[in-house]
Image (cartoon, rainbow, N blue to C red):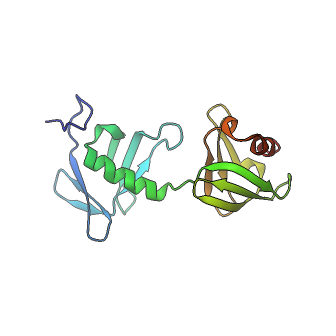
Amino acid sequence: MTSPSQTPGTPPPSFTLSRNAHGRLVLTLADGVPHVGALPVRAFPITAPSDGLSLFGTDGHELVWIDRLDQLPAAQRTLIEEELAAREFVPTIERLVHVSSFATPSTWTVQTNRGQVDLVLKAEEDIRKLEGRTRLLITASDGMQYSVPNVGAMDKHSRRLLGRFL
């Protein structure tokens, strides 16, 4: 029987998901064996975040493959999305306030959806252009990633500063 929150025609998953008292994700397969600390990993996190997702065990082996996240019942989908959100924290840059230099390494002061922050851009190659050059993924020297969903939607000052690095 298909849950009302599943895509029609999709068979029910052959596993269950829950959280234990320590907040860890517990995957129980059809054989009844629980796998504590299951880890969801997207196959295509940037180009198709809802398509192709694996649940890995703590030993690094894939336990379950999920074609599409929306095929899961709402409760399981919510657990996976919560786990992914905690791991895939990527602040969105809303505005460039200041850059220390147009040569790298350069310290950028940016306004994000989580507040103002200073980041160091080591090299211009740390700016990845996605989806027709309007969407950017910027990796700071400390490994933290920042997203720019649409360069064209930024203010003129920010576009001008970004243009010097693109």
Task: Determine the residue located farthest toward the bottom in the rendered image.
Answer: 22
At x 70%, y 55%, the residue is 110
User: Left or right: where does residue 2 sit relative to residue 47?
Assistant: left
Instruction: From the viewer's side, name the closer residue of 50 and 75.
Output: 75
User: Left or right: where does residue 153 sit relative to residue 71?
Assistant: right
Number of numbered discs overlaid on the protein picture: 0
Image coordinates for residue 165, horizontal then vertical, percent? 80, 45
**Quadrant of the drawing holding the C terminus:** top right
Quarter of the image for residue 9 reads top left
Query: Does residue 145 appear in the picture of this structure?
Result: yes
Query: Does residue 62 appear in the picture of this structure?
Result: no
At x 75%, y 57%, the residue is 108
At x 36%, y 63%, the residue is 58
Task: Determine the residue located farthest toward the left in the rendered image.
Answer: 1
115 w.r.t. 74: above or below: below
**Quadrant of the drawing holding the N terminus:** top left
Image coordinates for residue 43, horizontal then vertical, percent? 46, 43
Quarter of the image for residue 154 reads top right
17 w.r.t. 133: above or below: below
Image coordinates for residue 89, horizontal then vertical, percent? 52, 56
Image coordinates for residue 118, horizontal then vertical, percent? 71, 62
User: Left or right: where does residue 50 sit relative to residue 4?
Assistant: right
At x 57%, y 58%, the residue is 114
